[in-house]
Amino acid sequence: MRQSMDSVFVRVGALVLLVIALAYPFVNNPPAVQALSLVLVLSITVIGLNLLTGFTGQISIGHSAFFGTGAYAYAILVGKESMPAWLGLVAGVLTAAALGLVCGIPALRIRGIYLALVTLALATVFPAAVTKFSGLTGGSQGLVVPIVQSPEWTGLADDQFVYLVALAFMLGSLTISRNVARSRVGRALSSLKDNETASLSMGVEVAALKVLAFTISAAMAGLSGALFVATQGFISPSTSFVTLIGSIQFLTAMVLGGVASIMGPLIGTYLTQAAPELLADFNPGLSQVFYGLLIIVLMLAARDGIVGVLARCVRAVRRSRAASDVLPTRDESAERVPSSTTEVLGTESTERVNP
Amino acid sequence: MTLLTQQVMNGVANGCIYASLALALVLIFRCTQYINFAQGEMAMMSTYLVWWLTTVGLSVWVALGVAVMVSFLVGAVLERTLINRFDASDHLVLVIVAVGLFFTLNGLAQFVFGADGKPIPNLFPTSVIDVAGLRIQTNFLGAFLVLVVISAGLWALFKYTKLGLGFRAIASNRESSSLSGLPVGVLLAAAWGLAAAIGAIAGVLLTSLGVFLTPNMMVAVLVYAFSAAVLGGLDSPGGAVVGGIVLGILESLAAAYVPFIGSDLKISLAFAVIVVVLLVRPRGLFGSPEVSRV
């Protein structure tokens, strides 16, 4: 009974949010709309990263490289070769997915902390490679690309059109991520994070799933990068999102929002993009310190991020209200593979319990 | 021919820096099985301390000595107050914490010291000496000697002291060590302290090779040090030294003789080494094979 009440509540909430999101560009001034468009675009990378790190537990500090690949594919095709924008987006997604596939195959053998090493190195190599192939990429000068214009039939201002396009792509990515997470594949993926050996023995195709997760995740980062260029009109090797700093920002956003939550990436990206801007006016170094300390504090105090903290508050309130309930309330642990699979092998479940 | 020897010597000199930082990484990895992604930034902060001490009038060697001691303490305190709160087997969390630390220190240096380069007095007199027809720059020779001293010191520490025995014990089995009454916490703190102290030396050595001190000075060095440690074997101090020097030479030769790589792409060499070694021989040249029980 409560379950259906919950889902009604969630649906109404989502609908209200969607209405607010749709109304936003029509009641705000262009700079505010542009700022939020950027958040929507960047959050697509974080959604992808969350799919990989949050659900499968593979660590990537290299998503800036996938973002950059998509961004440059778009910039080269649309900016230099004057191809249509949609082709740039498709190319951005495909090239990043291809790079993700190439990186995903070694990731089969390289696990945990080693994968973090490899992806960190990838993040540092990418800007160097862009600088090197200056004939194609414009080198350290970067590339200027015409910003997407609103078609006349829509009657929208450019910033409103860009915002709505970004919103549509973000919702699409969110839906894909949600569906993957709740599907058979998604449950198999999160079982990898809990206990890979157990999943293997239960018939999960570990190798194929890991490569798949890596590829989808990279494709989302590529889409995000292509949209970034389409909406910002500029890319260079010193654009922070294609450097190691970008990778760390994506990671922070994911952790801040809540690892393995669906809405977390969006909230996290908003906070990492909006909060340091206030500090960045003062000093860019200070915003980094802010990010860094925030990550550490979150890991100490609230490992499940803002979404997790909110969920725990809701659960605590509900528990105190319905203390006499016989039936246990369903929580997100039901989304995971039943812990019996890990108990069979006599190892501890790695379900995160806050200290 | 002279160009070749010059390039090799350049490579060895840079390799000494990579090897020192790799030693710090290996020290922590051996004792804890995780990699401290913030090692380079900790070294960078220690180097700023040296710079500050030289600006208030200390000689660079005295400043280095003070910084080594302070870094040891800070590293040990960091382990006791922050790192030991996390489950050592949860790599995802530890990587995220180390990345957070990386970002905090890098930002702090930018905020406090600014992005412009700070000069540090050279550790060694700048001259060229002639050894059997080879003209060697003294700061190259100095860097190499410092690396030899660090490695010999570490080797002796591991082999002949109780502290070293303790390190070896917790590296081989932390639980049994704890049950046999070893102060595991103190040992871990000491390992972090030692790693931070070695990092301080690596940072100052780098400035002695003519690199200005900036907040981002150690980022690329960290990638090379990772690569060196992976090449040598993540749990092998000797491997870190060999790996660092081999990588330094490779980098220098590739930048000079392979036009495609040049100076822009040489960092991708470090990346390639990491990927190839982890795929082909994950334990590196001298590491012990990973055995896991399921």
Image (cartoon, coloured by chain):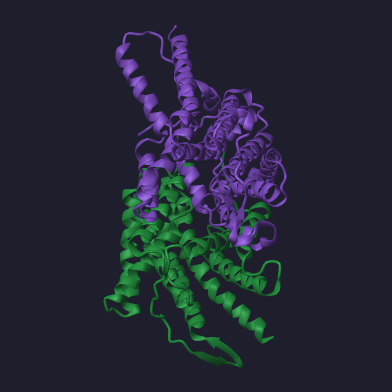
Q: Which tint is chain B?
A: green
Report x, y in % for residue B167.
42, 57
Q: Which residue extends farthest left?
A: B56
Considering depth in this image, is A344 or A161 the residue closer to the camera? A161
Q: Picture quarter containing residue B68?
A: bottom left
- Residue at 57 percent of width and 23 percent of height: A182
Relative placement, left or right, of B187 versus A225 is left
- Residue at 68 percent of width and 31 percent of height: A205
**Image chain in purple:** A
**In the rendered view of the protein, which quadrant contains the N terminus of chain B?**
bottom right
A109 w.r.t. B51: above or below:
above
Relative placement, left or right, of A237 versus A29 is right
Report x, y in % for residue B155.
46, 68
Considering depth in this image, is B48 or B83 the residue closer to the camera? B48
Considering depth in this image, is A216 or A95 the residue closer to the camera? A95
A103 w.r.t. A172: above or below:
below
- Residue at 60 percent of width and 35 percent of height: A150
Report x, y in % for residue A28.
43, 32
Q: Picture quarter containing residue A2?
A: top left
Q: Which residue extends farthest top?
A: A1
- Residue at 40 percent of width and 49 percent of height: B177
A306 w.r.t. B61: above or below:
above
**In the rendered view of the protein, which quadrant contains the C terminus of chain B?**
top right
Report x, y in % for residue A5.
44, 10
Considering depth in this image, is B116 or B266 the residue closer to the camera? B116
Note whether residue B286 is visible. Answer: no
Note whether residue B209 is visible. Answer: yes
B179 w.r.t. B46: above or below:
above
